[in-house]
């Protein structure tokens, strides 16, 4: 079978101007970046009545379970049924592209294109976020160097880089004498975890973007008072760097379905959803919008509902939960290397993971259909057993084969989704109320969604909690919990549906620009590292033709 990049390279995309014209954009409204990608205007006017479809998933194996592939296949399948549909997806980070998981363009015959461009530099949005983040860092150190009139005592702002690089987690800056600044401890997070990325994805306009950037807490003064980016007069220049990045990007699938690909926060260490602006743009130009939230439903799904929908006033009409036989067996105790072999008993054991996700989504009052993403090694016995288990939980399950067949392989799923969307949209409920104390919000997610029996706090987290609770501004902020994607708990080896564990809050960090509280669970790190055999071992370029191979 052809590789993803070969399939993408052999495709015949339409000019992006034609895709934009189909959506009703005038020629002078779009800004093409080459032939097949473009920036489009910020959405304006009233929200449409479009049906919003959230695609989320069970806890994955390290290679992922094809959630983006299912999202793309579903949208293509709906279009094959004659529906007016758009995608709203996240942009890829270079960390996974050169790490192990790969990019974020789907796979096989369910891809967004131009795949190479999107997975690499695209329209420069990630670079703009990185630049704005690091400009703020430079202004902080510059202010300290030239007298520190704001009295900055503790800096909590970190630099960022869009690559996996564990050596940058903790660094010392300002070394080499006074000419190089004032020495202090610093560190890097990956760009997908930068608060700037969250601000970009949650802002509603250029003015809202600037307001949020100015609100960012960069550190504390001598008496514990917050110091913000606006105190450094940083928000204007940061907004300048992000002006064009705020506009959504328009591309297409292999089958010509329009796709808004914009913003890229991870769901394990950030809030895991594409931009509100791109979602609204898609909803203003289609009857159905398929969007995804990163990793499992207890991470990206919970954050989509508790943060994005709460903040933007969005309500899904249907939720698609992606499951695979491979991940079920993995969660049932089968080693990753053995998960491709038939093992119905392990699959049944691992179904506890799916069952908890289904029950959790019911807590949000959502209608759910299970999409069984079929892999070539899956057997009929496994898929039949999986479908039966879903029916026992009251959920319909549909086998989807978008990877192998594109939209045709997802038509059955598309029909089911259209059927559910025809019903009145359920009223969205949340895991916790707006006005609950921070510690109660964390406990509501840890106990109610993850299955923990208790929540414990490090001394550092307790100290930072007191600072947060002293500021009434934070009283209504939702919580954004950073934890492993492989387990409901903080322990990535606790697979399936663990219960009765203690959830350790290692730190809590105010994100006044994003307007949520980041909670670090267990030993989760905001800068990933490369594995022993990263994708860089397999990516090549032909220096005569410039063609890239090994990208996925």
Image: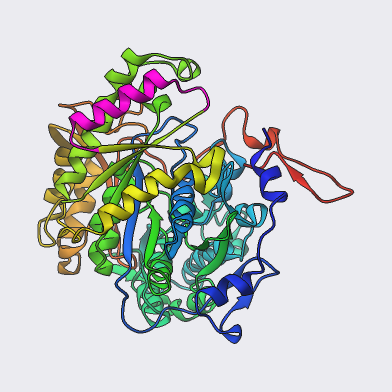
Does 43 sit left or right of 301 as displayed?
right
Verify whether residue 391 appears in magenta: yes
Verify whether residue 404 appears in magenta: no
Whether residue 457 appears in this view of the structure is no
Residue 491 placement: quadrant: top left
Q: Nearer the viewer, residue 253 or 173?
A: 253
The location of residue 303, given as percent across then percent down, is 29, 52
Does 67 sit left or right of 165 as displayed?
left
Seen in the picture, residue 478 relative to 215 is either above or below; the reply is: above
Does 183 sit left or right of 98 as displayed?
left
Does 198 sit left or right of 473 as displayed?
right
The location of residue 83, given as percent across then percent down, is 42, 62
In this view, the residue farthest toward the front is: 81
The location of residue 23, given as percent across then percent down, is 50, 74
Q: Nearer the viewer, residue 145 or 280?
A: 280
Residues rendered magenta in the picture: 376-395
Picture quarter with the C terminus: top right
The location of residue 77, given as percent across then percent down, is 46, 51
């Amino acid at each position: 079978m052809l590789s993803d990049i070969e399939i993408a390279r052999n495709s015949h995309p339409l000019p992006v101007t034609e895709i934009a014209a189909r959506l009703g954009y005038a020629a002078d409204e779009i800004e093409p970046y080459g032939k097949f990608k473009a920036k489009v205007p910020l959405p304006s006017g009233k929200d449409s009545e479009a049906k919003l479809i959230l695609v989320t998933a069970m806890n994955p194996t390290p290679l992922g379970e094809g959630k983006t592939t299912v999202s793309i296949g579903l949208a293509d399948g709906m279009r094959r049924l004659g529906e007016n549909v758009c995608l709203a997806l996240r942009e890829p980070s270079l960390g996974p592209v050169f790490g192990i998981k790969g990019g974020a363009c789907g796979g096989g015959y369910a891809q967004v294109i131009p795949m190479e461009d999107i997975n690499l530099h695209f329209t420069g949005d990630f670079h703009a976020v990185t630049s704005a983040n690091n400009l703020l860092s430079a202004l902080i150190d510059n202010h300290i160097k030239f007298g520190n009139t704001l009295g900055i005592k503790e800096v909590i702002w970190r630099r960022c880089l869009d690559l996996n690089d564990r050596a940058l987690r903790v660094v010392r800056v300002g070394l080499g004498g006074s000419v190089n600044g004032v020495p202090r401890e610093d560190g890097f997070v990956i760009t997908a975890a930068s608060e700037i990325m969250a601000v970009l994805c949650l802002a509603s306009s250029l003015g809202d973007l600037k307001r949020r950037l100015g609100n960012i807490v960069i550190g504390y003064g001598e008496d514990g008072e917050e110091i913000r980016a606006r105190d450094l007069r940083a928000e204007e220049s940061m907004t300048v760097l992000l002006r064009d990045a705020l506009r959504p990007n328009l591309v297409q699938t292999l089958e010509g379905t329009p796709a808004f690909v914009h913003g890229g926060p991870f769901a394990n260490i950030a809030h895991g959803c594409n931009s509100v602006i791109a979602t609204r743009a898609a909803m203003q130009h289609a009857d159905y919008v398929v969007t995804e939230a990163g990793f499992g439903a207890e991470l990206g799904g919970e954050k989509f509902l508790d943060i994005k929908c709460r903040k933007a006033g969005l309500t899904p009409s249907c939720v698609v939960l992606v499951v695979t036989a491979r991940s079920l067996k993995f969660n049932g105790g089968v080693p990753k290397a053995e998960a491709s072999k038939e093992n119905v008993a392990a699959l049944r054991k691992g179904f506890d993971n799916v069952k908890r996700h289904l029950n959790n989504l019911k807590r949000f009052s959502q209608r759910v259909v299970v999409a069984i993403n079929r892999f070539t090694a899956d057997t009929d016995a496994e898929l039949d057993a999986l479908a039966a288990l879903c029916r026992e939980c009251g959920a319909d399950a549909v086998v989807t084969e978008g990877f192998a067949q594109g939209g045709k392989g997802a038509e059955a799923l598309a029909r089911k989704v259209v059927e559910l969307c025809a019903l009145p949209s359920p009223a969205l409920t949340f895991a916790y109320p707006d006005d609950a104390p921070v510690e109660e919000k964390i406990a509501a997610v840890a106990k109610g969604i993850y299955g923990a029996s208790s929540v414990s706090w490090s001394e550092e987290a307790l100290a930072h909690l007191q600072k947060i609770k002293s500021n009434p501004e934070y009283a209504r902020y939702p919580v954004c919990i950073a934890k492993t994607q492989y387990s409901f708990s903080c322990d990535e080896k606790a697979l399936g549906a663990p219960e009765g564990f203690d959830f350790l809050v290692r730190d809590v960090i105010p994100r006044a620009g994003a307007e949520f509280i980041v909670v670090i669970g267990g030993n989760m790190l905001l800068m990933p590292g490369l594995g022993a055999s990263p994708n860089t071992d397999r990516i090549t370029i032909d220096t005569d033709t410039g063609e890239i191979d090994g990208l996925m």
